[in-house]
Amino acid sequence: MSEDFQKYIEFHRNNGGTGKIYNFKFVDYKKGFLKLEAEFPTETLNPNQTVQGGQMTSMLDDATSLLLIYETKGKIHPSSINLHSHHHRPLKKGQVFVTAKIITQGKNIATLKGELYNFDGKLITTLMHTVFLIKTEFDVE
């Protein structure tokens, strides 16, 4: 599974701006659920040395999108309609875990949930992500 998913991470890293920043690593996948390890580098920090909230939202946007792209084998590309994030506590630079879950998926719209955890297992940010589904063909090979 991890080798199969790695193709999607590499595609994201090579073709997307944020894909180069977060250094995603596969952890676990089940139908409708994805867990990744990631990191926030120095460039994502506020002057007070905590991760900027928009960077956390961006990471969760990427993770939830990767789950949907993977599950459709690249035939669907999500276009964000609404990103609603709740930041529960500050986060320092470094390693994190990200989870993504498909809540509902219809013909044209899906609702996804992303959660960001520090390495102590504390919930940092929750994202509710509504997307418009665009039919496309990604060549991840």
Image: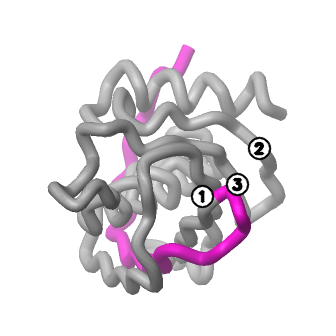
Do the numbered discs 2 and 1 sit on residues whose CB atoms are within 8 Å? no
- The amino acid beneath tag 1 is Val
Do the numbered discs 3 and 1 sit on residues whose CB atoms are within 8 Å? yes
Do the numbered discs 3 and 2 sit on residues whose CB atoms are within 8 Å? yes
At 51% from the left edge and 22% from the top edge, which residue is drawn?
Answer: 10
Q: Nearer the viewer, residue 141 or 11?
A: 11
- Name the mark on residue 98: 1
The magenta segment: 119-141
Q: Split into 4 quadrants, where in the image is the C terminus?
A: top right
- Name the mark on residue 90: none
User: Residue 131, percent across and down?
Assistant: 36, 70
Q: Which residue is mark 2?
A: 27
Q: CA distance from mark 3 to mark 1?
A: 6 Å
Along the horizontal axis of the image, is 137 left or right of 101?
left
Along the horizontal axis of the image, is 74 left or right of 15?
right
| Quadrant assignment, res 17 | top left
Q: Secondary structure at mark 3?
A: strand
Q: Is residue 120 above or below residue 41?
A: below
Q: Is residue 61 above or below residue 18?
A: below
Q: Which residue is mark 3?
A: 35
Q: Secondary structure at mark 1?
A: strand
Q: CA distance from mark 2 to mark 1?
A: 9 Å
Q: Is residue 109 visible?
A: no
| Quadrant assignment, res 109 | bottom left
